[in-house]
Amino acid sequence: MLSAKSLFQEIFDNDASFRLFCSIAASGEAQGGWENGRIAALLPESKRHLAAKVVRHGADEDKHGRIFQGLLKKRGMETAEVPEDTDYTMLLEGLGIGLAHEKLRGDEPLTEYDVLTYLVHSRVTEQRASEEMVLLRKHFGDDPGIGRAVRIISQDEDNHLAYCHEELLRLAREGHGREIHRLLRESALAEIRVYRDVSLGVMSRMGQLLGWSRPKAAALAAGIHARYVYERLGGWRRMVSLTMPERRDALGTDAASGAGAARAEPHAA
């Protein structure tokens, strides 16, 4: 029977598919680390109080990239080239979601609207990241090979999502509620489309590497399309709601640093 666990297990058990999976993940995390680093450097004076949190966000993303690279190294592999149609970050940018890399490469300080755009984009994409890591943690959190990595990354993604909720709620109280709602809806509808397209691209390549039969590949593609229909009809709304998180100040200076994160995750040492 085809299940999420059996599908991921098949991907993880094969060197070629595992290499592609980790390479795509490592690339996305590295891009996120660079983006947050540049955002922290370009924050306007009115938002400099966010700098430590944005830096922490970027450091976590960089750490995740190194973790995926480390998983490859343990199996004697180097990262593979990431196909353009599986580049989630750049495909979102192509739809005008988030801050353009051209802007981040410059020296011009960001505007307050840019910061709002960054937080909205992060709230939507971190929702997806958190959900995916919850799934992996459920099935592979105790796996001797990847369990430690999954637990660490999952905890970080939950912290990132909590941070986005809290900061956007603060901005909403300052009078930006209507603009936040508009941007969240726009970002979520674009994200579910990109997620569908990237999922189809990844599964197509996995199918080629693993020799999937046409019926199996078709069934997986149908499942991806069905999920998109569900999200387009209303599932996207979970990505735009804002609630005060249980984890307050999740990326603040008193939040777990690298050492603190290890203390919070007893098996991460």
Image: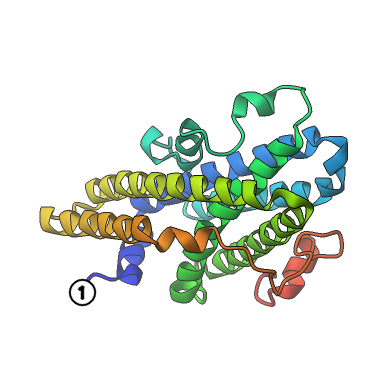
Name the residue rendered at 23%, 54% in the picture: 221
Q: Is residue 72 above or below residue 4?
A: above
Residue 216 picture quarter? bottom left
Residue 216, can we see it? yes
Name the element at disc 1: loop
Residue found 50% across the figure and 51% down from its top? 72
Left or right of 237 on screen, residue 14: left
Q: Quadrant of the C terminus?
A: bottom right
> Relative to residue 95, is residue 243 depicted above or below?
below
Residue 249's x, y, as percent? 79, 64
The amino acid marked with disc number 1 is Met
Residue 24 higher or lower than 222, as above or below = above
Q: Which residue is located at x 31 percent, y 64 percent?
A: 7
Q: Position of residue 107 (x, y in %)?
A: 77, 22
Work out whether residue 77 can be spotted.
no
Residue bearing the label numbered 1: 1
Q: Quadrant of the N terminus?
A: bottom left
**In the image, residue 146 lies at what x, y percent?**
51, 65
Q: Which residue is drawn at the image coordinates 37% and 45% (left, top)?
A: 198
In front of the other: 42 or 173: 173
